[in-house]
Image: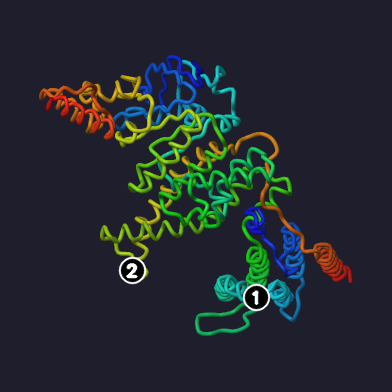
Amino acid sequence: MEKSYIEKIQIHKTNKVAGLHPATKFLVVIMYTICTFVLSSVSLTKIDLPLLAIPWFLVVLLLCAASGALKKCLKALKAVVFIALIIFVVQTFLVPGGEVLVRFGILRICEKGLRTAVSLSFMILDIAGIFVWLFQTTENKEISRALEESGMNYKAAYVFTSTLQMINILSDNSKTIMNAQRARGVETEGNMFIRAKAFFPTLVPLVLGAVMGSEERVLTLEARGFSMQGEKTHLFNLEKSGAEGTFKAVSILITVLVVVGRIALWIL
Amino acid sequence: MDIIMECKNVTYSYPLTKKPAIKELNLKLERGKFYGVIGENGSGKTTLCAVLRGFAPSFYKGEIEGEVLVEGKKIGEYGGELAKKIGFVFQNPFTQISGVKDTVFEEVAYGLENFGVPAGEIERRVIDVMRMTDIEHLAEKSPFELSGGQMQRVALASVIVLEPDLLIIDEPTSQLDPEGTESVFAIIQKMKEKHKTIVLVEHKIDLIAEYADEVLVFKDGAMIASGDKKEILSDMSLLEQGAALPQVAILGRKLQEKGLPLSTIPVTEKQAVEVIAEALKERKR
């Protein structure tokens, strides 16, 4: 017999890590973030660099690999690495204070600069990285369903989901508008300066169009009973992979160990 | 007469405007009838739809005088429940997609989910409606990847699946090609056969002439004529008021003026062929 449509829209994952319930994944993310903050407060080496945040990033890669989505995640991580790199370079050279470590002509690297650079860039890399894992291994509708399940207002959950969906639609719209503006003689290709000039004529109609469309979308939703009181049905249901308990326990355990270790370091 | 909706002396103006968009409207909608609304641009047709659906003033704000009653009860008292009674479809197919669903099936099911209908029943009803609106082959596609005509059919299906008694449809075909228009009208025709009350705003007058039972004519926010479509659409004085009339009605009137003894003024092509053929036969004799 052919599968019913309701069965077809369910998401079945065979991978135990990728298939974790979104709430569990979120707990892992929170715990990881707490650990990141704690670990980056530990200073090592002679000039007090918070180096522990660097190996900590391996956990993200490990999770991605265990979810069987390493390739996808690495693609998304590229952008994060790029941003972290820029922050690293800028902070290293620009923040003064402490002893001067190296000097190249007018550029110099100070102790404090290097310290903030390492802590800031790796903290960003770690935290953004774990979110990349969360979003690359979880479908939008899983997230929004989990939000509703956790007791979030359905309106807030709608805003969240539609925002995620809108990103793709807006990028399509911007292409249409770019073509239209090009037809009117606005130059959209060339060096940075030309592109910057084309920014407004494409962005303004895009944003205004989205705002105007939202009025009609409100009416659409209203016509579909969006503000109906009472229990709603959910055709899409979340599944558990079975590894939720283990992941919750392990992530909490690690966090507790990290925090205890940090406190012990303080006292000793 | 079974009245599903009634407007008593309704005057409505949008916020920050002095001139009312709807003036002293008295209107009774009978259950099971198909009303075609015509009039030039800016004559208040879309505002009429908003008033009938309760969006004006609850969503648009502005001032309303008089009463709008749905089955004898004031429209403001229904709140979110109104979605069960009144279906609303409008012009732009692209903004009538909820934006939170990945497939057409889920999109059509969205309203029923909000109503809290059990999952098994949802599946059954959605499949029925998808068959009726001829979108079942699109069921697993993303609603944003469809063409305008397909999207409009999805929008119609999403509303029809809720089984409202009254359907308000505002220029559903203005952005569609002839084929899309035809498919939308085929759906509306099916709804008429199910004895739904339909209010349709449409510029394509020949389609109104073919499908509607009664015609309402608007000009500058006022309803200047209403009644049986044959009467209204053959009333040449409306041409001076800026309303469009079917080509065949104008032809009929001109032929009459030239001395061809037509029994009535035709409003649809089919009628025209019959009436003119009859008159020509008469003449030969």
Towards the viewer: A1 or A205: A1
Q: What residue type is labelled 1?
A: Leu
- Specify the label residue A92 is tagged with: none
Q: Where is residue A150 in the image (x, y as percent from the top left)?
A: 73, 49
- SS type, badge 2: loop
Percent across and percent down for residue A197 are 34, 61
Query: From what the image shows, is residue A19 above or below residue B94?
Result: below
Quarter of the image where one finds residue A200: bottom left
Given residues A66 and B241, the one toward you in this image is B241
When asked about the image quadrant of residue A43, the answer is: bottom right
Picture coordinates of residue B169, whole percent (x, y): 43, 35
Q: What element carries label 1?
A: helix
What's under tag 2, amino acid-wise?
Glu
How would you rate the neighbour count of disc 2 (Cα within 10 Å): few for under 14, some for 14-19, many for 20 or more? few
Mark 1 → mark 2, Cα distance in angstroms: 34 Å
For marks 1 and 2, the one nearer the N-term is 1
The residue depicted at 59 percent of the width and 28 percent of the height is B79
Residue A70, label in figure: 1
Residue B252 vertical position relative to residue A15 in the rendered view, above or below: above
Q: Do the residues labelled 1 and 2 touch (CB within 8 Å)?
A: no
Query: How packed is label 1: few (under 14 Cα within 10 Å), some, or many (20 or more)?
Result: many
Task: Please indicate whether residue B168 sits to the left or right of residue B17 in the image.
Answer: right
The residue nearer to you, when weighing B259 against A146, is: B259
Residue A189, numbered label: 2
* Total numbered circles: 2
**Camera-side mark, 1 or 2:** 1
Q: Can residue B246 be seen in this view?
A: yes
Colour logic: rainbow
Left or right, A229 with reference to A257: left
- Residue displayed at 50% across by 59% down: A168
